[in-house]
Amino acid sequence: MEAWTVAEPGPIDSGPLQLVQRARPEPGPTEVLVEVVTCGVCRTDLHLAEGDLAPHLRGATPGHEVIGRVVERGNEARRFEPGERIGIAWLRHTCGRCRFCRRGAENLCLHPRFTGWDDHGGFARHAVVDEAYAYRIPERFGDLEAAPLLCAGIVGYRSLKRAAVPPGGRLGIYGFGASAHLVAQVAIAAGVEVYVCTRAAAARELATELGAVWVGEAAETPPVPLDGAVLFAPAGELVLPALEALDRGGRLSVAGIHLSDVPELDYQRHLFQERELVSVTANTRADGEEFLAVAANTGIHVQTMPYPFEEADTALADLAHDRVVGAAVLEIAT
């Protein structure tokens, strides 16, 4: 089968991805084999391709926002029927035994595995996943729209919860890409005022269209104090203006798996008066199920930019250079 692989991590414009021929994977006893229909293109895929995240699997196939149809089941797999549409997300295995798994925090598992990092992902014609880590996809979302829900949506939703904005409060969003444009809609539907700071003009336009009450440049100060904020841009220098924009008791949630270095904090300006800075690490399966239900009930709009399967490297380059509005999605099976 055809699959994209990270041959040698490096700057995206140097061509770290290669399209290769690889044997079709075989499902293990509790796994299902999926014919990939669409796969979202996430900034984490870019970090893996460029080497910001150290490779766990040599020649890994990226892609962890996978929508596909079950074509084969392992001999112990019974959760999904052949032909059923399912989703494969970032988190694909946890040990179930460590102290974090036992207390319901499987996103902090000591022995996790991640799609496209530890095992081959969805920039390919077929992919496998343990059925316990796959998701049923709400029917109201088409294949293109469903793909970004599986990471941009799920991890973004966890980031929103970690920001702890009270009902009717004010949420700041820093960076406005695939994840942010979904989170903004969930927050607005819940009665939260959204304030967006982002560098791309097209992203600022989209934020306005989706209902943000104020939109500014990446490091611009919102006109009112914020009750909470989420930093989606992988730019550590934005931590300082985001913290400074918080009201007393506000919390900044950092959503990315990778962040550039954070400059030195000034305690009085950035943390005093019980401001908080928290990180987000992956998600639990419960987060995923909760978000998919919220997304279906809220009726959020997923803004996508489709790319042919053969242009996965172009999609990542466009993401790196702020040419994607909303979420980039590969169309793999027709």
Image: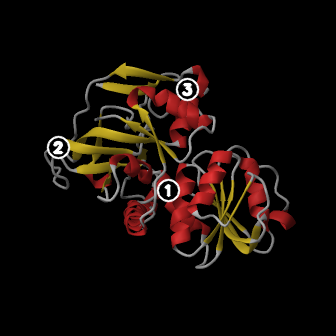
Q: Residue furthest left?
A: 75
Q: Residues within 10 Å of mark 1 (few under 14, many from 20)?
A: many
The residue tagged 1 is 155
Left or right of 191, for residue 142: left
Looking at the image, which is closer to me, 37 or 255?
37
- The disc label shown at residue 74, or none: 2
Looking at the image, which is closer to me, 149 or 237?
149
Residue found at x 80% / y 49%: 263
Q: Is residue 279 visible?
A: no
Dividing the image into 4 quarters, which one contains the N terminus? top left
What distance separates the C-alpha of mark 1 from that of mark 3? 24 Å
Residue found at x 43% / y 54%: 149
Residue found at x 37% / y 35%: 120
What distance separates the C-alpha of mark 2 from that of mark 3? 33 Å
Circle 1: residue type? Val
Dividing the image into 4 quarters, which one contains the C terminus? top left
Circle 3: residue type? Pro
The residue tagged 3 is 9
Residue 296 placement (x, y as % from top left): 37, 64
Q: Residues within 10 Å of mark 2 (few under 14, many from 20)?
A: some
Residue 260 placement (x, y as % from top left): 69, 43
Q: Is residue 211 visible?
A: yes
The numbered mark, 1 or 2, whose residue comes first in the sequence reads: 2
- The residue mark sitting in front, 1 or 2, is 1
Q: Residue furthest bottom?
A: 167
- The disc label shown at residue 220, or none: none
Circle 2: residue type? Gly
